[in-house]
């Protein structure tokens, strides 16, 4: 029996969408399936480093620019033409990929246009409810997102039922769409072996998210610890950056770590500082760690999750 080909395509919006696809990728590989990865930017660079033997394809995304301050929703609304054009472009590109790579299943992590009636199309999201700065906007956003979800054969929600869930109202406020189901938390770490590291630290800062807030958070962490005597590790979340390692006082900065090294630091470092992105929360939960959470300013989803999981 010939192995089927699975296309897995995460959104390039920080690294979280890519990292949470790792257990899905490993599961298909363990079952003898052929996996092709499609992304762009840092997400593609990271996937190449994590799975060097798999075929990767550059699939351009929206390249959304965040505002340095204020509501990110309004910044995104201003870029709606770019989002719509990008969705149409990736939908057309998918037809070509299906033909060239003989794809039978497409798994899209929050990419709106990667569905096709000729193959099984699966959409991953934890935001059935998209938080907005004004509540009156949420029904419209929910309706628009539901229209996207309905294009797919299945919608996978990386969470669990009951009081122990992580997404709160984002996935559990309303009944699930007819094609949706909860699949449990997704994290690369349960199937990753921790490996020894050269140095232990008191503080670990995980920098992530879209620009310019990735850089602003990095600068904030440097400012906080540059005069401290406590050894601090800052993981910059830039897999394609040529600056792999540097130091400022007692701060060590690295562009990216292997999953095994990062797991070790997450388990051993007393103090963790990070954004309140959902993929990060799943990682922390499955490693049984707590962290100091800093939501991306003006991003209602992260602000909500930060309050929900405040240390």
Image: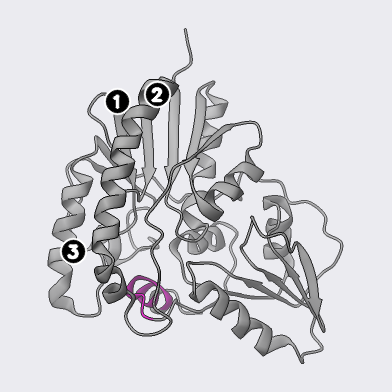
Residue located beneath label 2 in the image: 103
The range drawn in magenta is 298-306
Q: Residues within 10 Å of mark 2 (few under 14, many from 20)?
A: many
SS label for mark 2? loop
Counting residues from the N terminus, which is met first, the one under dot 3 or under dot 2? 2
Question: Which of the 4 image quadrants contains residue 120?
Answer: top left
* Badge number at residue 119: 1
Front-most of 70 and 104?
70
Is residue 222 a member of the stretch shown in magenta?
no
Indicate the position of residue 229 as horizontal and vertical percent values. 82, 88
The residue lying at 82 percent from left, 84 percent from top is 249
Is residue 302 a member of the stretch shown in magenta?
yes
SS label for mark 3? helix
Indicate the position of residue 20 as horizontal and vertical percent values. 50, 50
Magenta stretch: dominant secondary structure: helix
- Mark 2 in CB contact with mark 1 (< 8 angstroms): yes
SS label for mark 1? loop
């Amino acid at each position: 029996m010939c192995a089927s080909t699975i296309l897995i395509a995460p959104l390039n919006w920080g690294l979280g969408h890519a990292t949470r696809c790792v257990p899905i990728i490993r599961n298909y590989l363990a079952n003898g399936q052929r996996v092709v990865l499609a992304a762009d930017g840092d997400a593609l660079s990271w996937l190449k480093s994590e799975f060097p033997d798999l075929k990767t394809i550059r699939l351009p995304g929206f390249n959304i620019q965040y505002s340095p301050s204020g509501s990110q929703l309004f910044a995104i609304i201003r870029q709606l033409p770019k989002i719509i054009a990008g969705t149409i472009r990736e939908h057309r590109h998918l037809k070509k990929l299906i033909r060239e790579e003989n794809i039978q299943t497409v798994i899209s992590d929050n990419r709106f246009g990667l569905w096709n009636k000729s193959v099984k199309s699966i959409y991953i999201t934890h935001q059935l409810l998209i938080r907005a700065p004004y509540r009156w906007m949420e029904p419209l956003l929910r309706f628009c997102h539901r229209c996207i979800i309905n294009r797919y054969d299945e919608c996978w929600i990386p969470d669990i039922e009951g009081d122990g869930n992580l997404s709160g109202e984002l996935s559990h406020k309303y009944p699930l769409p007819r094609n949706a189901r909860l699949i449990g938390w997704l994290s690369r770490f349960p199937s990753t072996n921790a490996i020894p590291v050269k140095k232990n630290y008191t503080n670990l800062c995980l920098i992530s998210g879209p620009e310019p807030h990735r850089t602003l958070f990095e600068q904030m962490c440097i400012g906080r610890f540059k005069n401290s005597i406590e050894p601090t590790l800052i993981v910059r979340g830039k897999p394609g950056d040529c600056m792999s390692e540097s130091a400022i006082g007692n701060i060590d900065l690295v562009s990216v770590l292997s999953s095994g090294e990062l797991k070790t630091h997450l388990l051993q470092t007393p103090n963790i500082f990070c954004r309140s992105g959902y993929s990060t929360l799943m990682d922390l939960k499955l490693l049984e760690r707590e962290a100091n959470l800093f939501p991306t300013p003006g991003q209602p989803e992260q602000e909500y999750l930060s309050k929900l999981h405040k240390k």
